[in-house]
């Protein structure tokens, strides 16, 4: 089904190379990934721009999907280019102006042995309209976070650089605990006790006008929004240091913000009920947000090649 309606719900899902109706995109109960978390996935956004919907940083997301599959020893039955084209076509067919896109590859139906490599790999692309992950006011007002009692997976107990389904039980524990304690989000320390990342976001800490962010050695996912923000900070001429961040630095920071495809650039206004800086969005956070939304909306010329239009240009345009 095709359409140009502004708020049409997704009706079509890409399943192993075919476009199928939403209700037909099902899996069998023997699907390995359901039992053991053996899936790899991405979260991507398409933004509304003057040229129609455009997928933000399509190639890096697809590349990371394939890197996650490589780490999980999962043979992808499609090429990166096929997945890129399928993402664009799925956005197009569903008539979205803006949407969240969830490509996922999984070990499918077959034997239940834990090893899983005899099971076929199934690939799906699902889209949906999804607003602000941490709430509409969060972008301006900021969120309240707690340092979780759950640690992020250690380098020798998981693969933090891969988006592997089963690993997200760790993120669920962090988020559920935060919600139960009245916080918007949880922030995990790494195995060594220094700051890692949020349940689904990377973290940036501003102290004395310098921006600090942890490295992959602190069990982070190498976020694509993190990479985007590093480019924006360079554009703004702001110094960035990649360092292990002790927990107490969070309490004396001038500003903190979290980044993610779902969370975009979200200020943190308190950590463990300790107010961050002045308790409202700080100037560096605001400058990064303003640039981020200027690029994602297509308002600012796409000098970094971040936007891939989902709708082909009209003939002669
Ligand atoms: N860390 C984790 C654990 C995540 O799940 C995400 C969301 N993908 C991020 C960080 C942010 O990554 P990105 O900016 O690529 O969405």
Image (tube, rainbow, N blue to C red):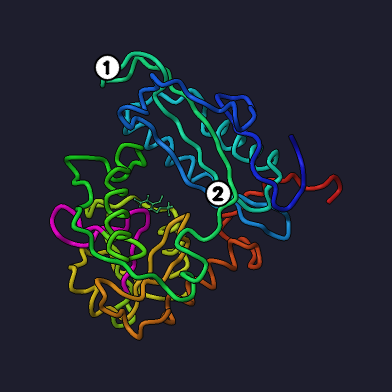
The residue indicated by pointer 2 is: 100
Q: Which element carries disc 2, helix, strand or loop?
A: strand
Whether residue 95 is in magenta: the answer is no
Mark 1 or 2, nearer chain start: 2
What is the quadrant of the N terminus in the image? top right
The residue indicated by pointer 1 is: 113
Within 10 angstroms of label 1, few (less than 14), some, or many (20 or more) residues?
Answer: few
Q: How many marks?
A: 2
- Which residue corresponds to the image point at 52% horizontal and 29% vertical from the top-left? 79
Between the residue at mark 1 and the residue at mark 2, the CA separation in whole angstroms equals: 33 Å
| Part of the protein shown in magenta | 188-205
- Which residue corresponds to the image point at 37% horizontal and 37% vertical from the top-left? 68
Q: Which of the 4 image quadrants contains residue 120?
A: top left
Q: Which element carries disc 1, helix, strand or loop?
A: loop
- Relative vertical location of residue 106 with respect to residue 110 in this rendering, above or below: below
- Which residue corresponds to the image point at 55% horizontal and 35% vertical from the top-left? 125
User: Tags 1 and 2 in contact by the CB under 8 Å rule?
Assistant: no
């Amino acid at each position: 089904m095709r359409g140009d309606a502004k708020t049409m719900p997704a009706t079509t899902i890409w399943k192993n190379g075919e476009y199928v109706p939403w209700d037909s995109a099902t899996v069998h109960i023997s699907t390995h990934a359901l039992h053991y978390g053996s899936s790899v996935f991405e979260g991507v956004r398409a933004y509304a721009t003057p040229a129609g919907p455009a997928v933000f940083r399509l190639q890096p997301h697809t590349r990371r999907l394939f890197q996650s599959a490589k780490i999980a020893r999962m043979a992808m039955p499609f090429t990166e280019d096929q997945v890129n084209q399928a993402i664009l076509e799925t956005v197009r067919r569903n008539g979205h102006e803006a949407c969240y896109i969830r490509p996922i590859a999984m070990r499918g139906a077959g034997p239940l042995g834990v090893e899983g490599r005899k099971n076929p790999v199934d690939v799906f692309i699902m889209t949906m309209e999804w607003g602000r992950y941490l709430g509409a006011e969060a972008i301006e007002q900021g969120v309240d976070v707690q340092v979780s009692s759950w640690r992020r997976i250690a380098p020798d107990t998981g693969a933090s650089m891969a988006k592997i389904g089963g690993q997200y039980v760790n993120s669920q524990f962090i988020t559920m605990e935060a919600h139960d304690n009245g916080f918007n989000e949880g922030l995990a320390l790494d195995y060594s006790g220094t700051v890692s990342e949020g349940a689904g976001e990377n973290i940036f800490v501003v102290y004395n006008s310098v921006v600090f962010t942890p490295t992959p050695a602190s069990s982070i996912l190498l976020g694509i929004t993190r990479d985007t923000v590093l480019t924006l900070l360079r554009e703004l001429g702001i110094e960035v240091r990649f360092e292990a961040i002790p927990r107490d630095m969070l309490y004396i920071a001038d500003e903190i913000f979290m980044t993610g495809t779902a969370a975009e650039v979200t200020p943190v206004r308190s950590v463990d009920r300790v107010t961050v800086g002045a308790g409202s969005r700080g100037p560096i956070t605001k400058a990064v947000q303003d640039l981020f939304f200027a690029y994602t909306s297509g308002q600012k010329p796409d000098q970094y090649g971040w936007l891939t239009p989902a709708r082909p240009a009209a003939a002669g345009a």
